[in-house]
Image (spheres, helix red, strand yellow):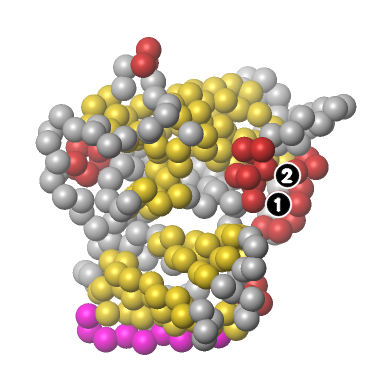
Amino acid sequence: MRRSILIALLAMPSTLSACTTREPAKAEPADAVRPEPARAQRVQLELARVPDSLAQPVIAALGLDAIGLIAARHRIDPDWHIYWRNPGDAGLPTRLTSTPGEGSSVVLGPTILPAPKRFEASFGWADEAILFVPILAGEGGLTIRSTWVACQSEACVSGQNEATLASSAPVEPVEPVEDVVLEAMLDRIPRPLGDRLVAHAWTRTDERVTLELTFAADARAVELLPDASDPALFFADARFDPEQHTLSIDWRVGSPGHPLPASQGVLAWTDASTTRYFELSLPWPE
């Protein structure tokens, strides 16, 4: 099975991000996934501290106890993509692990992932993906390793990159340089849903769990980018009613006794002119 091959290639602990699980993928040829030779990596990694003028509004919106953000920029070959925390039917989540430099006092928090794009039955990023690591305290150099699976229409490869940041100290250029990709990725970081959620209700049968959400009236369209929850629950469907401003989400009940993910997923919320992203994290029913 393709998933089994990927897990064998890439299963490793991560201190900066958590792996979710999903419904087993369809069988693939044994040679469909292979380690990527270093000289032909499909993904390149660069590190930089996010300018505080961009980082601090995000830190405040998320309620983080952080002093800054590091941007781990993945430059991805054309026609290839890497994967979000729920990769869907292929791939594995992109993971970051860190090592402080000699004499460094820097302390980092869990990886912050921008909302992904949908690639048929999978979720991830193409072209450029920037993952963010909060700086909780201290200063100094550090090395970050990214472990990923990259796929295109006919093949998948696994790989790792390392990049070093000489100092995590703030750097604010005298002449600000516009970075459209960085700003777009910061905008895709899911914020708390807050009072946009007016009401919610759970219903459950032996075979299905349903969550109905009622939103504020400015919601024109709401799409769920679901967290995987195999083998406890399998995401089944989500239906938005623009007249009632409601989103109904169905899961199929799996095997009892398995832990559920921390959230239900990310909501892509479109109002009159803008799509924004919000974390949907409600207590699961008993």
Quadrant of the image containing the C terminus: bottom left
**Label 2 packing within 10 angstroms: few (<14), some (14-19), many (20+):** many
Q: Is residue 203 above or below residue 237?
A: below
- Secondary structure beneath dot 1 equals helix
Q: Is residue 33 above or below residue 240?
A: above
Mark 1: which amino acid? Val
Judging depth in this view, the residue of 89 and 285 nearest the camera is: 89
Q: Does residue 202 appear to the left or right of 30 in the view shown? A: right
Looking at the picture, how far across and down is residue 124, in whole percent? 42, 45
Q: Does residue 182 appear to the left or right of 206 in the view shown? A: right
- The span picked out in magenta is 199-207
Q: Which residue is mark 1?
A: 58
Q: Are marks 1 and 2 in contact (CB under 8 Å)?
A: yes
Looking at the picture, how far across and down is residue 270, in whole percent? 58, 65
User: Is residue 47 visible to the viewer in this orientation of the structure?
Assistant: yes
> What secondary structure predominates along the stretch shown in magenta?
strand
Location of residue 273 (image quadrant): bottom right
Looking at the picture, how far across and down is residue 4, in whole percent? 19, 42
Quadrant of the image containing the N terminus: top left
- C-alpha span from label 1 to label 2: 5 Å
Q: Which residue is mark 2?
A: 55
Residue 226 in magenta?
Answer: no
What mark, if any, has residue 33 been given in the picture?
none
User: Is residue 98 visible to the viewer in this orientation of the structure?
Assistant: no
